[in-house]
Image: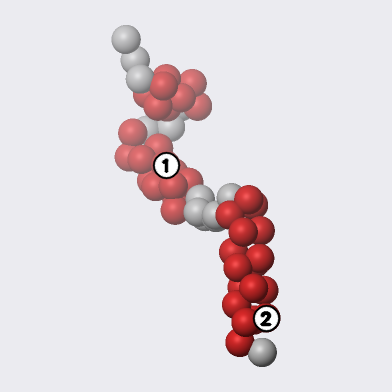
Amino acid sequence: MLTVRRERELEEGINKRLSRKLDRQWKKSIVVRPPPSLKKLQEEEAAAEAEKSS
């Protein structure tokens, strides 16, 4: 039983070290963003705070 990663390495003919390097780059390229629902909630809270202070 091969892992998915190892299967990909064999299919694409890339060696283990290179694939780990690629995986690391891929992992770093992922940017964690808050979900749109949370963003909307935060904007509403900020607007409410601005109204209170003025």
Camera-nearest label, 2 or 1: 2
Mark 2 residue element: helix
The residue lying at 44 percent from left, 53 percent from top is: 28
Query: Which quadrant of the rendered structure holds the C terminus?
Result: bottom right
- What number is the disc on residue 51? 2
Q: Nearer the viewer, residue 6 or 28?
A: 28
Q: Is residue 6 above or below residue 47?
A: above
Q: Please name the amino acid that badge 2 sits on.
A: Glu
The residue lying at 48 percent from left, 46 percent from top is: 26
Which circle's residue, 2 or 1, is located before the other in the chain? 1
Number of residues whose C-alpha sits closer than 10 Å to that of mark 2, classed few (under 14), some (14–19) or many (20 or more) = few
Q: Nearer the viewer, residue 32 or 5?
A: 32
For mark 1, what is the residue?
23
The residue lying at 42 percent from left, 42 percent from top is: 23
- What number is the disc on residue 11? none
Camera sees residue 29: no
Mark 1 residue element: helix
Number of residues whose C-alpha sits closer than 10 Å to that of mark 1, classed few (under 14), some (14–19) or many (20 or more) = few
Residue 42 appears at what percent x and percent y? 59, 64
